[in-house]
Image: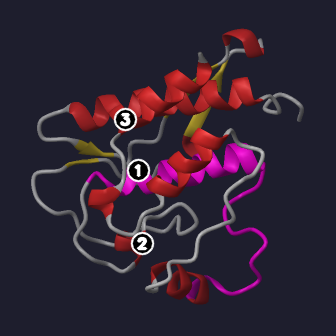
Amino acid sequence: DDLIKSDELKLKISLDIARGMKILHSFNPPIAHRDLRSPNILLVGLDPKYLCAKVSDFGLSLFVTEKLEGNLYSWRWMAPEVQRVEDYNELCDLYSFGMVMYELFAQKIPFQDFKHDKEEMRRRITSDTGLRPKVPQAAPRKVQKLIVKLWKDNPEKRPSFEKCVKVLENEME
């Protein structure tokens, strides 16, 4: 339970995930994971000093040759454009990554404190005001800013995984 308590370890896990996703998005055409969430992140190693995070479960992954469509079911991590059943692309993974980072730094599942049913939560997340969890104050300031940018409703305004890697590498120095 104490394993993922240090900021250094949370940053390392976030960086490992961002590096893996950067590779998927670097293909031509890019690969959208479409199910990036904490249950699909494997932690390899028993010693926190050598721990490595690996992205797994590529069952919903697709090459992005055109706009993707179809609803997915992991609503807590799912980008608003996917929840609205709009066309979307690999940029949906960036929003999901923001939720994974939230979970690491807040130490709780996204929206676990909200008592509304799933459909009401989807309505609030996809509304003009775009409900998001409270940014974890325990996270370093640059990580907080990165999470907020990853949660942008407009996918084109989210930072790339390349940018995420740079921010996280700089934060670890």
The type of residue carrying mark 1 is Leu
Please give the name of the residue rendered at 45% of the width and 53% of the height, measured from the top-left corner: 150
Indicate which disc, 1 or 2, sits on the residue closer to the N terminus: 2
In the picture shown, does residue 84 fall above or below 90? below
In the picture shown, does residue 85 fall above or below 110? below
Q: Which residue lies furthest to the front in this view?
A: 141
The reply to whether discs 1 and 2 touch (Cβ–Cβ < 8 Å) is no
Indicate which disc, 1 or 3, sits on the residue closer to the N terminus: 1
Tag 2 residue: 80
Q: From the viewer's side, name the closer residue of 65 and 140.
A: 140
Q: Where is residue 146 in the image (x, y as percent from the top left)?
A: 51, 46
Q: Where is residue 133 in the image (x, y as percent from the top left)?
A: 66, 66
Tag 3 residue: 163
Q: Which numbered dot is residue 41?
A: none
Q: Which numbered dot is residue 94?
A: 1
- In magenta, the rendered stretch is 90-119
The reply to whether discs 3 and 2 touch (Cβ–Cβ < 8 Å) is no
Task: Locate residue 163 relative to residue 75 in the image: left or right.
Answer: left
CA distance separating discs 1 and 3: 11 Å
Indicate which disc, 3 or 2, sits on the residue closer to the N terminus: 2
Secondary structure found at label 3: helix
CA distance separating discs 3 and 2: 21 Å
Quadrant of the drawing holding the C terminus: top right
Please give the name of the residue rendered at 53% of the width and 69% of the height, measured from the top-left corner: 75
Secondary structure found at label 2: helix
CA distance separating discs 1 and 2: 11 Å
Please give the name of the residue rendered at 78% of the width and 45% of the height, measured from the top-left corner: 138
The type of residue carrying mark 2 is Pro
